Amino acid sequence: GYSYEGVLSAATLTFGALSDLKGLNGEETLKRLAVKAQPGDSGGPVFDDNGHVVGMLLPRTDGDRKLPEDVSFALDGAVILKAAQNAGLNSKMAQSTAAPIAPRDLTLRAQGMTVLVSCWE
């Protein structure tokens, strides 16, 4: 995503790890990540090692809880796929590839599909 909200001229990729297949309250539509995300990263794609989009990074909302700064959440890709299909888009799940792609190739792929979105009042 655009970690620094447009200060840098290109999207950046932050590497992390999948911590849990559910949210803190057992939500099956969320994935818990071990990654220190910045506010500008929200809405960006979450990739697996093969370069497939598997989710969307959500904005941080701790609520009453004080979570460690390296805890982030992603909306599961299946939820996004269903919403796209319901909107009439021809989308499908990617087939798994045999081997992970190199970090540089993953970064280039991410930069090719990530755009800066700014909201103005």
Image (cartoon, grey):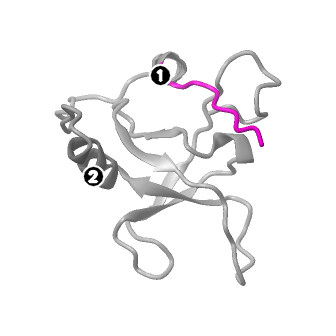
Q: Relative to residue 19, is residue 79 drawn left or right?
A: left
- Look at the image and tell me whether residue 38 can be seen: no
Q: Residue 120 at what x, y percent from top left? A: 75, 38
Q: Measured along the vertical axis of the image, is residue 55 above or below residue 94?
A: below
Q: Relative to residue 8, is residue 99 drawn left or right?
A: left
Q: Secondary structure at mark 2?
A: helix
Identity of the amino acid at label 2?
Answer: Ala
Precedes in sequence: disc 2 or disc 1:
2
Between 65 and 98, the one nearer to me in the picture: 65
Residue lying furthest front: 121
- Look at the image and tell me whether residue 45 can be seen: yes
Q: Residue at x 69, y 72 (%)?
A: 62
Q: Residue at x 45, y 19 (%)?
A: 109
Q: Residue at x 33, y 31 (%)?
A: 50
Pointers 2 and 1 in contact (C-beta within 8 Å): no
Q: Residue 4 at what x, y percent from top left? A: 79, 34
Q: Relative to residue 114, is residue 75 drawn left or right?
A: left
Q: Which mark is residue 38?
A: none
Please tell me whether residue 119 belongs to the stretch shown in magenta: yes
Q: Residues within 10 Å of mark 1 (few under 14, many from 20)?
A: few
Total numbered labels placed on residues in the image: 2
Q: Which residue is mark 2?
A: 78
Quadrant assignment for the N terminus: top right
The CA distance from mark 2 to mark 1 is: 19 Å
Q: Which residue is mark 1?
A: 113
Please tell me whether residue 112 belongs to the stretch shown in magenta: no
Identity of the amino acid at label 1?
Answer: Met
The range drawn in magenta is 113-121
